[in-house]
Image (cartoon, coloured by chain):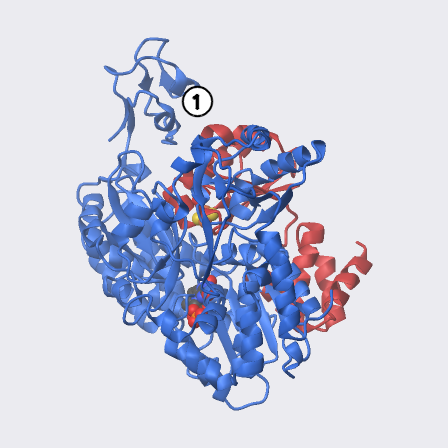
Chain colours: A blue, B red
């Protein structure tokens, strides 16, 4: 590869590769991020590759990232000249063979199509590229365009602008969609203060949890004394239940790299680090390739675009410690030390990595940067609410019909996310709460479903934006169990430096455990509240300071559930094992033997076509009978 | 133990002290755990006190000082998986293998370790065995999945 030294060269590559992503011949994309692979995309890709080879077809086959609708994976996009782009969903090897068969005859299987796109928006340039249509199969008329599809209609993709559209391992495709042109503009036409000014004006706030204004952080770091500065990307993504950073890194790594280079130039840094969790091997691999390609083109390295600016990026893999997502612990970890946080009376923008001024931002924050600079602060700040600008990616998971990643403008209501986009709770169950903010956040109850989602509103109701996890819970979720779950997570992950965090969380967990076992005592709730206050007030880092939140928020909205456990020794959601028994409604039981065969304890007796019965002495409450009963006769009390 | 392998790993990182975590990760990738001889050797090569090396090796969850089984089962204990009933899956695996979380089977076939979110939350409950990720796992499918690994 030749280095790209000027705009003409960049434009040339862009034009050439636009032909690659809007091709004259058929192009097929398979979503092969971790979530796609786990759903079987690897096999689908394999079959496609074999078919193309066997039939000697002139088709380009591409591995792309995740387009967000993980529920429907594996997703396969077909771009056939003359047709709109169509997305097939829930593919497997058998279905994809049929699709190829049909494609060759100029036909489609409309029942397997998720949506179509008649044009693509290149947000960065503000242009739309319609697909020239001719001779399209009739069935395609009826297919819903993406922009009217309920899952996508309310979304606005800024950070995820390229995810699922491009081959993340091919820098040229990123360039084709306008990539690295912003970097050129910044390095050649802007001075660093202008860049910081623009980011500040845009109102962008950190997407990693705290929501600190990004422009202000850059400004502090730029103006901190010293000649060496570092820029760091936080890809530790510790919030269990959030995976947008993984998806962005796997689907569009260059958006993060370009953001970091722009930030480094603005801040005056020549050395960058990406701290990424080891649990994401595919993201690490994609990033490594991306960095190499960016180096080959000269976007990283010495004298980028002949501007005299040097910048390099190194990857550090984490070690599976949640606390290492915290800024000071993360920096200790990059230095090769134990990841313990330190007091932040001196901010990391003044003294961070190796005691030099260091600017840390989250993956999603960095991915926003190129677009904000390209489109301007005015454009960006029109999106969102007064104090929370732009979009946020949420991972909509748990008891929800359409699981996936959704990028929505700030200010959208929970109802719109959960019902309009998410399609509500499956299986005619009742929605109970949504958990946001990870282990530092809280559970928001049904009454607050019309809450507009932004940094302030979520904090106001006792939760947090956090990194964007949104775990939906239904009537079968026990809120005491959830509080216990988070505290056991935090107990494991507390680094142990502060006594109040280490011992306080342990004590709270003991109390919660005893409540779920039916051994709760009068006064336990008050004790939990008291301990919460101590832990929150006397811990050094935000892990301890926010650790009581899951308990406090569930106490605030679901106190009756705690009381039912303590006073009546009952678990209303029928989750806590010590408080429930399984039995069979013998009148309704058809005697089909299914549960009897599955029961690992041989606790179920009864002959074919005779009612079955559970021997309570043997039952370990694994629930396999209930999960598999077709007639719904297994009851829990 | 072939100490040259360890030397090569250390050289890849230019023997910088700050690379300790990366070096330990590569050693573990090679041996499945952190063998004592390897750590002693790293102490010499990097001139880092052993207490520091052990501090790091025990602080980070991914490291283990005990040999692991031939196959590593990671059960996701993230929030989405918890809500979707992963605890039952974990208990099923424990019963099936006759070990508890954090243990290794006597025949060294499996090690069972929890992990905090694999980033495939949309497919909860999720179990990872070696490089393979299984989504939407059901209790009754567990023994069939385990059979694939000898
Ligand atoms: C215990 C703890 C864990 C954290 N984990 C993460 C994380 O996994 N990813 C992240 O980006 N920020 C995490 N943060 C927030 C970071 O400390 C920091 O605020 C953030 O990375 C700054 O980037 P931003 O301003 O772009 O959000 C965590 C904070 C705490 C206290
Ligand atoms: S919570 Fe299990 S994969 Fe994320």
Residue A63 percent coordinates (x, y): 60, 47
Which x, y percent locates residue A100? 59, 32
Tell which of A41 and A339 is nearer to you. A41
Camera-nearest residue between A375 and A39? A375
Pointer 1 residue Cβ closer than 8 Å to ligand 2? no
**Up-down: is B14 above or below B111?**
below
Where does residue A514 sit, x and y in percent of width and height?
Answer: 30, 48
The residue under label 1 is A598
Q: Nearer the viewer, residue A188 or B46?
A: A188
* In the foreground, A635 or A55: A55
Q: Residue at x 48, y 86 (%)?
A: A193
Q: Report the side of A488 relative to B131 (left or right).
A: left
Circle 1 Cα neighbour tier, 10 Å, few/some/many (<14 / 14–19 / ≥20): some
B91 vs A496: above or below: above
A603 left or right of A356? left
Residue sitting at 63 percent across and 51 percent down?
A: B66
Q: Secondary structure at mark 1?
A: helix
Residue A211 in view here: no
Looking at the rendered structure, the number of numbered marks drawn on it comes to 1
Q: Quadrant of residue B1?
A: bottom right
B84 relative position to B98: left or right: left
Q: Residue at x 56, y 42 (%)?
A: A80
């Amino acid at each position: 590869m030749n280095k790209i030294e000027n705009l003409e060269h960049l434009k040339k590559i862009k034009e050439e590769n636009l032909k690659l992503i809007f091709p004259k011949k058929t192009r097929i994309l398979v979503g092969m991020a971790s979530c796609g692979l786990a759903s079987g995309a690897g096999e689908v890709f394999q079959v496609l590759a074999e078919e193309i080879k066997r039939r000697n077809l002139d088709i380009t086959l591409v591995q792309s990232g995740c387009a967000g609708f993980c529920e429907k994976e594996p997703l396969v996009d077909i771009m056939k000249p003359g047709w709109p782009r169509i997305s097939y969903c829930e593919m497997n090897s058998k279905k994809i063979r049929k699709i190829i068969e049909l494609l060759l005859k100029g036909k489609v299987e409309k029942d397997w199509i998720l949506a179509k796109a008649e044009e693509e928006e290149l947000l960065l340039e503000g242009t739309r590229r319609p697909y020239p249509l001719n001779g399209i199969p009739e069935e395609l008329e009826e297919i819903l365009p993406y922009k009217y599809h309920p899952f996508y209609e309310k979304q606005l993709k800024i950070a995820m602008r390229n995810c699922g559209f491009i081959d993340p391992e091919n820098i040229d495709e990123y360039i084709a969609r306008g990539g690295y042109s912003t970097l050129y503009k910044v390095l050649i036409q802007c001075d660093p203060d202008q860049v910081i000014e623009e980011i500040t004006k845009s109102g962008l706030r950190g997407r990693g949890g705290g929501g600190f204004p990004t422009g202000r952080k850059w400004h502090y770091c730029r103006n901190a004394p010293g000649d060496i500065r570092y820029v760091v990307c936080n890809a530790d993504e510790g919030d269990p239940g959030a995976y947008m950073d993984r998806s962005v890194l796997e689907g569009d790594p260059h958006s993060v790299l370009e953001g970091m280079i722009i930030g480094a130039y603005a801040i005056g840094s020549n050395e960058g680090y990406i701290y990424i969790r080891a649990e994401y091997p595919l993201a690490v691999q994609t990033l490594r390739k991306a960095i190499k390609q960016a180096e080959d083109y000269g976007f990283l390295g010495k004298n980028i675009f002949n501007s005299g600016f040097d910048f390099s990026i190194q990857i550090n893999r984490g070690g599976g410690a949640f606390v290492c997502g915290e800024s000071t612990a993360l920096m200790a970890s990059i230095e090769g030390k134990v990841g313990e946080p330190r007091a932040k009376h001196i901010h990391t923008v003044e003294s961070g990595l190796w005691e030099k001024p260091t600017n840390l931002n989250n993956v999603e924050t960095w991915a926003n940067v190129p677009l904000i600079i390209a489109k301007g602060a005015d454009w960006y700040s029109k999106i969102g609410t007064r104090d929370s600008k732009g979009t946020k990616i949420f991972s909509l998971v748990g008891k929800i019909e359409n699981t996936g990643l959704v990028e929505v403008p700030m200010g959208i209501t929970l109802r719109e996310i959960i019902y309009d986009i998410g399609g509500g709770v499956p299986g005619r169950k009742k929605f109970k709460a949504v958990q946001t903010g990870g282990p530092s956040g809280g559970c928001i109850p049904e009454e607050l479903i019309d809450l507009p989602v932004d940094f302030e509103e979520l904090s106001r109701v006792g939760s947090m934006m956090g990194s964007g996890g949104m775990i939906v819970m239904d009537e079968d979720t026990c809120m005491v169990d959830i509080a216990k779950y988070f505290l056991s997570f935090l107990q494991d992950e507390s680094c142990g430096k502060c006594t109040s965090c280490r011992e306080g969380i342990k004590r709270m967990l003991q109390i919660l455990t005893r409540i779920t076992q039916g051994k709760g005592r009068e006064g336990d709730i008050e004790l939990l509240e008291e301990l919460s206050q101590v832990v929150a007030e006397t811990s050094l880092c935000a892990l301890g300071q926010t650790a009581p939140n899951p308990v406090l928020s569930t106490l605030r909205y679901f106190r009756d559930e705690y009381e039912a456990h303590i006073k009546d020794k009952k678990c209303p959601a029928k989750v806590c094992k010590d408080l429930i028994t399984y039995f069979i409604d013998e009148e309704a039981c058809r005697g089909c033997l299914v549960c009897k065969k599955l029961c690992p304890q041989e606790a179920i007796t009864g002959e074919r076509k005779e009612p079955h019965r559970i021997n309570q002495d043997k039952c370990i409450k694994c629930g396999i009978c209930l999960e598999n009963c077709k007639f719904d006769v297994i009851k829990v009390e | 133990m072939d100490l040259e392998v360890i030397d090569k790993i250390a050289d890849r990182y230019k023997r910088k002290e700050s690379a300790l975590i990366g070096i330990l990760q590569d050693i573990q990738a090679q041996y499945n755990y952190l063998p004592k001889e390897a750590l002693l050797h790293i102490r010499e090569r990097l001139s880092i006190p052993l207490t520091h090396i052990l501090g790091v090796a025990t602080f980070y969850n991914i490291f283990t000082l005990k040999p692991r089984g031939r196959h590593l089962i990671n059960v996701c204990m993230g929030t989405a998986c918890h809500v979707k009933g992963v605890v039952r899956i974990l208990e099923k695996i424990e019963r099936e293998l006759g070990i508890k979380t954090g243990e290794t089977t006597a025949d060294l076939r499996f090690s069972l370790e929890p992990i905090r979110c694999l980033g495939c939350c949309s497919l909860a409950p999720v179990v990872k065995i070696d490089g393979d990720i299984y989504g939407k796992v059901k209790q009754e499918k567990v023994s069939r999945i385990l059979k694939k690994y000898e």
